[in-house]
Amino acid sequence: MLQAIRDKVTGWIAYGIIFLISIPFALWGVNSYLGGGEVLPAATVNGEEISVRDLDQAYANYRQRLSQLFGGTIPESFDNDSIMREQVLGQLIEEFVLRQYTQQQRYRIGDDELNKMIRGMDAFQRDGQFDTEIYQSQVRSLGYSPVGFEQELRLNGSIEQFQNGIRESAFVVPVFESQFTKLSNQTRKLRMLTYRVDPASIQVHAEEIEQQYQSQADRYRTPERVKIDYIELSLDGIKQNITVSEDDVFARYQESQGAYTSAEIREASHILLKVGADEAADEALARITEIRERITNGENFADLAREFSEDPGSAESGGDLGEIERGVMVQTFEAALFSMEVGQLSEPVKTAFGWHLIKLRSVSGGETQSFESLKSSLEDEIKTELAESQIYDLVENLANLAYEQPDSLLPAADQLGLPVQTSDWFDRSAQQGIAAEQKIRQVAFSPEVLTQGLNSEAIELGGDRVVFLRLNQREAPTLQPLEQVQERIKSELIQAKARERSLKIGTDAIADLKSGKTLDDLAREWSSSINDLGFIERNQSGISAAVLGRVFSMPKPDQGMVFDGLSQANGEYVVLELSAVLSNDANNDREALDGLAEARGGAEYQSVLKLLTSRADVVRTPAEDLSDTSANY
């Protein structure tokens, strides 16, 4: 990927470094983008302003995360701008309260911890080591001085201290653990009966379709669409215009030749005679020399190793040391071994362990790949490095130009000699052209681009591509003709009527069951079969979460059966018969109990945060005034 770009350009900083330094938030420090005091704040918290720009950025990030959660398209039931903006503003208020409180209470990060934190960030490293030059350049590209950046780290680290202090000090008393274990391990005996309405039995009249069309016209509008202008940079595109001489490629080959040479591996055996406490070194030498003479006279090396070697790890295997690379053995042993020819028997070798005889059995590896075999990959490697450097400069220049002249991409394109391309029409769920990229759709429909008409920041895409975009045209939703949507409306009405009918029949059935009718009687009436599931667990597979939730919320049967039911999303009605409940506290799941403590810690932290927020002096700007304010950007 474009490591240099990712580390240095604003777009990557926003999604990379700010994410790393913000615990848990990624939104502070953007007030500097606003000029003057003419614009109303979204809210004030104890006298400190939350700007509309802060809110817009937070809202855009929230929509992006929500879109990713749902596979690229936010469901209609979730996509309510006013409600979501209120939720995001509420979170921002809590963030500001938390920051103010930790500052007042003097939470802090020491110099050593701060230094360790910065040096551990991948964004500031080159070849696995912290690089001061990279650190300073990236901090500047973010708009910070090193001092300001470190202050931001200290602030967010102190917030993490406060959070961890509450979360990690939470505990669960034994009685709650026991209750939790019993409930977690509880099983319930269940039978189910499902009622299905035949859609073919449902009639829908033209008048009903017309009424639905008129009363819910917003549901039958075409989606909002846009066209965008964009400038695209790609690593492959830049590489195509770079030429590298063969001399440069060969120089790279020579510089890195060691990386293309396989390790030399030698298989060897040895005989070791240790020098005893009461034995002189020359006596051990005499004994090893005698053994060497026996080997040279034709005796088997492995047999003599089994008889005389005092190395417990290899003696039984005839002195076999296996495969040996450089750097494994002590220096004198290694020097002798790697100077020998295959089949050769060494002279006695002295080490701290004693006297050795070494026999080299085989040599493998040590080959160096030829220049011709590596020429193409080395050339591509050099082009990639040069292209990354060029694309960094291009993106940095584009980012500056796009920011300085935010109402057009043409000046930036003209100055850098890049074409401005225009997309086809697309909506929020488009899957074609440049709009097939979810990031492109997200940014194209963001408030900055869609309503404020600004150039986007750098957008990194897969395949080492970077895009800047702006709005070209916007098409508002339009009501589709009834002829185009009447089949859809008819299907919706059939589903609604089927759901209503099944709910009525199911509700009446529950009443009959509670009055004495059995589930078997009901199954015969409905010409349906009962699904006898026996005892089920809370996380039983093959059963919907809705059914499990209802079953485990039903009261424990004292005598006979307990009945309940619920409508399913597909219009079916499920009747539930609970006949027995078993609790088992023998299985004390430590992992589950740890999770309970973590949940308790999270709940306590949220309670503290809510309390601090309730005590804060918070003033919100009315939503209609915020709309007017946003239009001024």
Image (tube, grey):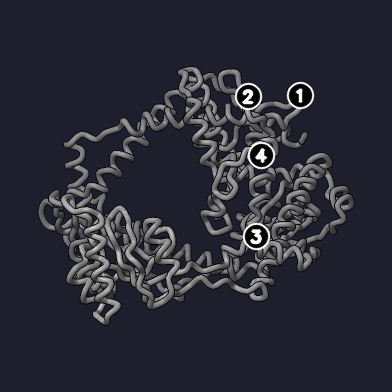
Q: Earlier in the sequence, mark 2 or mark 4?
A: 2
Image quadrant where one finds the N terminus = bottom right
Q: Which badge, 3 or 2, comes first in the chain's sequence?
A: 2
In the figure, residue 47 lies in which quadrant?
Answer: top right
**Disc 1 to disc 3, how far (Cα)?**
55 Å
Residue 239 vs residue 42: left or right? right
Given this view, does label 3 or label 4 mark the residue nearer the observer? 3
Nearest-to-viewer mark from 2 and 4: 4
Which quadrant holds residue 535?
Answer: bottom left
Q: CA distance from mark 1 to mark 4?
A: 34 Å
**Residue type at the position of mark 4:** Glu
SS of the residue at dot 2? Answer: strand
Q: Nearer the viewer, mark 3 or mark 2?
A: 3
Identify the mark at residue 255; answer none if there is no mark.
Answer: 3
- Whole-percent x, y for residue 158 in the image: 47, 27
Crowding near the residue tagged with mark 2, few <14, some 14–19, many ≥20 C-alpha atoms within 10 Å: some
User: Are there few (<14), some (14-19), or many (20+) residues within 10 Å of tag 4?
Assistant: few
State left or right for residue 177 relative to residue 47.
left
Which residue lies under the disc numbered 2? 49
Circle 1 sits in a helix, a strand or a loop, which is it? Answer: loop
Q: Residue 461's spot in the image, x, y percent? A: 66, 57
Label placed on residue 36: 1
Left-right relation of 548 to 220: left
Mark 4 = which residue?
Answer: 133
Q: Disc 2 versus disc 1: distance between alpha carbons?
A: 13 Å
Q: Amino acid at mark 2?
A: Glu
